Image: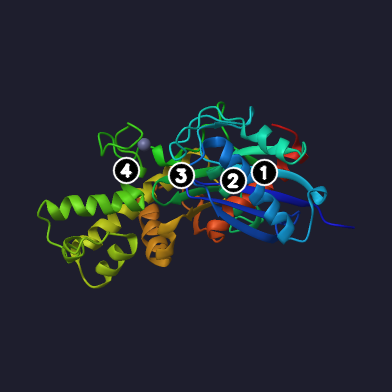
Amino acid sequence: MSKKYYLGIDLGGTNIKTGVVDEDAKVLSKYSTPTLAEDGGPKGILTRMGQAGEAAIKQAGLNIDDIVAIGVGAPGALSHKDGIIIAPPNLPGWKNVPVRDAISEYFNGKFTTLENDANAAAWGEYWAGVGKGTDSLVMLTLGTGVGGGIVYGGRFVRGYRDVAAELGHMIVEPRGRLCACGQHGCLEAYASASNAARIAVEKITGGTQSSMRAVIEKGQPITTEVIVQHMHQGDQFAYDLWHETCRYIAIGCLNLNHTVNPQVIALAGGMVNAGQHLLNPVRMYYNDLQGNIFGGLCSEIVLAKLGSDAGLVGAAGAAKITLELGDW
Ligand SMILES: [Zn+2]
């Protein structure tokens, strides 16, 4: 019996990634092309998404008739139900764009579904990555910002208006740092790679002693790698900053455990390149901070493993599950 194939399209602010994935989550092809968000607006980008999808289908040695359904992962805010991208901050000029129907039309009416990109990535890890075989997974993506997705009982948790799982905007420090969203003390204001760097620059230019001062004076960026490297070279401030960052991530994980109690909480995004240097302190604070009646019952924290493929694998998986279960 021949396999069923799904096309995943992951629309990012920088790149459009596409791939054909079979019903067992095996990736048959991968293709990537620049989004060119500044140039062309929705029409040009929708055409490039279609062309990139065709390229992935061709690369897999298939044609459109072999594809059962198409899943598009895109930045929010969006409406899954209406198939519309509402107003993503990284796609200037986009307002209420009917992406689902436009892609379906490009592929001659093929069944298409639209999913928040962070939800899609969580689905990818649940279906094919570190969550394979689990009942439930929450993914926390620690990159330029902090995003997330929740899969529970084999379904997406999208929320009433598709804005659930905005995990970066959980408040972890009342009256804390101002976040880009307008709230104070969001997890993202502390635990994103860019905000950890921002905190380092603020403190060091404010007079805090650190070997990272030389990096700033050379005009080079403070990255997660730089912080971890200076911590290992014995810089006390780098140590304190990294541990504070990991403590905030642990607080976020505890809140997620107390809300959802998923089988696993998967950490993803660029910060995960720090590997055990991230996982070990996060687990340590998570264990230290948790209440004394939850011993052994809390979610396990793990590192995601699909990397940047999670988005397109999950978009294809979203097409499969949405088609199979109906539009719930
Ligand atoms: Zn926020």
**How dense is the environment of label 3, judged by Cα within 10 Å: few (below 14), some, or many (20 and up)?**
many
Mark 2–mark 3 Cα distance, whole angstroms, equals: 11 Å
Q: Disc 4 on helix, strand or loop?
A: helix
Image coordinates of residue 204 in percent, x first then y, are: 15, 55
Query: In which quadrant will I find the N terminus?
Result: bottom right
Q: Which residue does the numbered mark 3 point to in the structure image?
A: 147
Three-letter residue code for mark 1: Gly
Mark 1–mark 4 Cα distance, whole angstroms, equals: 31 Å
Which mark is drawn over residue 189? 4
Three-letter residue code for mark 3: Gly
Q: Are marks 2 and 1 in contact (CB under 8 Å)?
A: yes
Q: Which residue does the numbered mark 1 point to in the structure image?
A: 71
Image coordinates of residue 132 in percent, x first then y, are: 64, 56
Image coordinates of residue 103 in percent, x first then y, are: 67, 38
Q: Is residue 297 above or below residue 112?
A: below
Q: Which residue does the numbered mark 2 point to in the structure image?
A: 120
Q: Quadrant of residue 153?
A: top right
The mark that comes first in sequence, 2 or 3, is: 2
Q: Which residue sits at x=27%, y=54%?
A: 197
Q: Disc 1 on helix, strand or loop?
A: strand
2 vs 1, front mark: 1
The mark that comes first in sequence, 2 or 1, is: 1
Q: Is residue 18 above or below residue 213?
A: above
